[in-house]
Amino acid sequence: MEIRAKIDKTIKSKHSNLIVAADTNSAEELVAIATNIGSNICMLKTHIDMIDDFSPKLIGKLKQIAKQENFLLFEDRKFADIGQTTLHQYTEGIFKIADWADVVTVHALPGPGILQAIEPTCVQRKSGVLLLLQMSSNGNLLSDSYRQMALNIGKKYQHIVPGVIAQQKLNDEPNWLTCTPGVKINDAGDKLGQQYNTPKNVILKNNSDIIIVGRGITRATNPKQEAEKYQRLAWQSYIKKTSM
């Protein structure tokens, strides 16, 4: 499980279990976010298809910053099609996600074929998949029964599935990381159904491993200062959890 080892090494060497969601439609702003808070994160989460002025040069810049600041690139693509289509979406097209993303997100909705299709590429590129089990939006349809079926699929592909996206730890698999989105220190939610939780609650109460923070950092008056705050709070909680 090379991708899991890579994530663990990054977390421990940087004392950071913080992922920042850089949800922007500007290539310039995406590079600026990566440059500004790169030293504080273990991964940078992108939605590359949101970028209005995308070019291959952007990927080159992101890879350079990621190498310099020692973080992984996480494309939150949420693949959810049949295996053959997903493979093309992953490896081809203008974005060529497999060429640069260390981690991508995948829905288990299509069944095991979606992981089977991209498995050889993940193994070759030493990249991995975070399986989407829960979302932070109010009223989402990812039920308990769905989550259990998704877990059963993911267990068969643990060599490329280093973890899951969920609001709390949902299984006892020691080799799976739980990454939790919707984290914000001082906000209960937004007008579009987003629900927030604090770093301390996410890690100590819900037993997650990594927090994912978006607007709480990227839209802050001082993003660097906020990134440092979230990194500190999340890491302190992580150390406390692992020492229990």
Image (cartoon, rainbow, N blue to C red):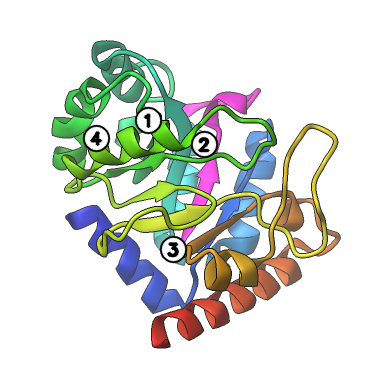
The residue that label 2 is drawn on is 58
Identify the element where label 4 is drawn.
helix
Q: Of callouts 1 and 2, which one flags the residue occurring earlier in the amino acid sequence?
A: 2
The amino acid type, in three-letter code, at marker 2 is Leu
Tell me which amino acid carries mark 1: Ile
Real-space Cα separation, disc 2 to disc 3, in angstroms: 15 Å
Quadrant housing the C terminus? bottom left
Residue 97 badge = 1
Residue 151, percent from left and from top: 31, 41
Badge 3 amino acid: Gln
Residue 11 locus on image (x, y percent):
40, 70
Between 14 and 211, the residue placed more toward the observer is 211
The residue drawn where x is 82% and y is 56% is: 187
Left or right side of 175 for 168: right
**144, 219: nearer the viewer:** 144
Which residue does the numbered mark 3 point to in the structure image? 68
Label 4: which residue? 153
Q: Dot 4, how many residues are within 10 Å of its Cα: few (below 14), some (14-19), or many (20+)? A: some
**Crowding near the residue tagged with mark 2, few <14, some 14–19, many ≥20 C-alpha atoms within 10 Å:** some
Q: Is residue 84 left or right of residue 43?
A: left
Q: Nearer the viewer, mark 1 or mark 3?
A: 1
User: Which of label 1 and label 2 is nearer to you?
Assistant: 1
